[in-house]
Amino acid sequence: KAGVTQTPRYLIKTRGQQVTLSCSPISGHRSVSWYQQTPGQGLQFLFEYFSETQRNKGNFPGRFSGRQFSNSRSEMNVSTLELGDSALYLCASSLPSNTDTQYFGPGTRLTVL
Amino acid sequence: GENVEQHPSTLSVQEGDSAVIKCTYSDSASNYFPWYKQELGKRPQLIIDIRSNVGEKKDQRIAVTLNKTAKHFSLHITETQPEDSAVYFCAASDRNNAGNMLTFGGGTRLMVKP
């Protein structure tokens, strides 16, 4: 099976802009979770989508949003970018249970100038 | 919510020695504990996981132990090799949570000196 893919891999934006990141899960996986990875805060959970519905949400401001399509592909959007949003954004796909393995994509490296 | 603490933050060992990384969690409802290895510039990859109905699990040179009473779990790597050098993350998942939401520890940078 093909692994989790994310596009784009690298992105440079300026403050105030918005950005959309995409994640394609492993075939058959309907759960997609998003994480932000930074040197200072580590890996932090953003949100999880399952069957096109947000099932869990982490402690991030409303500028961070996401959605999931009927083919399980997911997008996350960050509006009004801030310098502190510079990070590696990782998505992970899995089967639906909380004890199922999450498989990570390669990530999108976002730099906000 | 869940809080996971991981120690040490850096660990340097000689090739062939053992390495131990420890994590504690706060939510007694957590029931799934994976460990991920992340090499520089690469994605986190699952190396081993344990569920709360099991006390220990082993896979070749890697083992994980879980103490539910004390709410801590540990990763043990024996006969370390230079290719084990990476950042290791522990995580916990809450069974009361309907979905997939991992809370990660802060990571341990393991350096294996040849």
Image (spheres, rainbow, N blue to C red):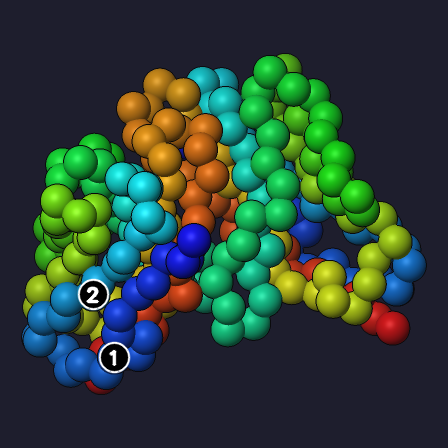
Amino acid type for the residue under numbered disc 1: Leu
Say which chain tag 1 marks: A
Q: Amino acid at mark 2?
A: Leu
Where is residue A32 drawn, in percent x and y? 28, 45
Picture coordinates of residue A46 (x, y %)?
27, 48
Q: Is residue A106 left or right of residue A12?
A: right
| Residue shown at 21% from the left, 63% from the top | A22
Residue A35 relative to residue A51: left or right: right
Q: Earlier in the sequence, mark 1 or mark 2?
A: 1
Give whichever of B102, A84 is nearer the camera: B102
Q: Looking at the rendering, which quadrant does residue B39 occupy?
A: bottom right
Residue lying furthest right: B16
Q: Is the C-beta separation of discs 1 and 2 under 8 Å? A: yes
Work out whether residue A93 or residue B85 is closer to the camera in this orientation and state it.
Answer: A93
Q: Residue at coordinates 13% horizontally, 40% vertically from top-left?
A: A52
- Element type at marker 1? strand
Q: Which mark is residue A21?
A: 2
